[in-house]
Amino acid sequence: MSALRPLLAAAGLGLGIATVREPGPRPAGPAEAAAAASMPARRRLEFLAGRRAARRALRAVGLHCGEIPRWGRLPVFPPGRAASISHSAGIAVAVARAAGPGLPLGCDLELRPLPRAAARLVLREDEEELLDDRDEPFHAGSRPTGAGWTVTELFSAKEAAWKALVGTGTGTGPGLGLACLGEAGEGPQGLRPARPTGSLRDLRVGPAEDGLCVVRLRADPARAVRVRVVPVGTGVFGYVLGPSPGLGPSAALG
C-alpha cells in the first residue's frame, strides 16, 4: 500500500494506512471512546485503525485532526477536513485532500478477490460487457487498452464512487456540513442520520481513458466521478480522482 503514496500524491491525495495489529490502539477522545465501547472486539479494532488511517491521511496533506466521532455510521470531521476510510483483512486505509473541500472523495480496499458469481450483486445487464473472464485482478502497471475488468475491480470502483456521490466518504450526510452535529451525535433540530439507500447496482460504470472509469448515478447521470483502480497484492484499491470531465464539484456531489 505504501508504494501508492506517489500515485495518490500526484492526484492531490494523501494516503493513511493503519492495521488492527498495531500495539496499544487508543481512542483519540471521548466520542471515539464511546463509539468503540459499544462495538465487538474485532469491529472496535477496525474502527480505531480506520480513525488512525484518516488522521495519517490528513497529516499527509498538511492537516491535523483530533478525534473523529460518528453520526450514525458516518465519520464526522472538523471544518476544512475530510477523508474517506476503507477496511479489508485487518488493514485500514484512508485518503484525504488538502484543497477543494467540495470535491468528491472516496476510496475502497478489497484484498480478497470476489468470485465472478458476485457480479449479479454489483452489475446490471448493461454493464456485463465490461467483465473479463480472468479470475484475478491485474498484477502489473497499467491496464491494457480494451481489457475487461474483474468483478473485484468493478466492485471497488463502484464502492469508492458510492462514498463520494452519496457523501459517506467525506463524513457529511447529504446536505450537511462538516461541523453541524450536536454533542449527542444529532443533526440540526435533533435529526438522526439517515442511512444511504440503494445499492451499487444503482450506479453505472463505464470505461474512460488511461485505464480509468467513470461511475455515475443512474437516477441522476450528471452526478459522476472518475475512479482509478490499482492492484494491491491479490486485491485492488479504488479511489476517486475527481468529478467527471465537464462537471463542477457541485454537479458531481449534488
Image (cartoon, rainbow, N blue to C red):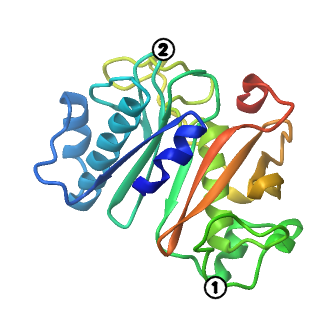
Report whether residue 197 is seen.
Answer: no
Q: Residues within 10 Å of mark 1 (few under 14, many from 20)?
A: few
**Left/right of residue 7 with respect to residue 120 in the rendered view:** left
**Left/right of residue 117 with respect to residue 236 in the rendered view:** right
* Amino acid type, label 2: Gln
Q: Which residue does the image show at 44% across and 29% down from the upper left?
A: 61
Q: Tell me if residue 227 comes above or below residue 82 in the rendering.
A: below
Label 2 element class? helix
Tell me, for residue 135, which label it has, or none. Answer: 1
Residue 148 lies in quadrant: bottom right
Quarter of the picture holding the C terminus:
top right
Q: Alpha-carbon distance for marks 2 and 1?
A: 50 Å
Q: Residues within 10 Å of mark 2 (few under 14, many from 20)?
A: few
Number of numbered labels in the structure image: 2
Q: Which residue does the image show at 85% across and 70% down from the upper left?
A: 146
Image x and y of residue 26, in percent: 15, 42
Quarter of the picture holding the N terminus:
bottom left
Q: Which residue does the image show at 21% across and 36% down from the upper left?
A: 34
* Amino acid type, label 1: Asp
Q: Which residue does the image show at 33% across and 31% down from the upper left?
A: 68
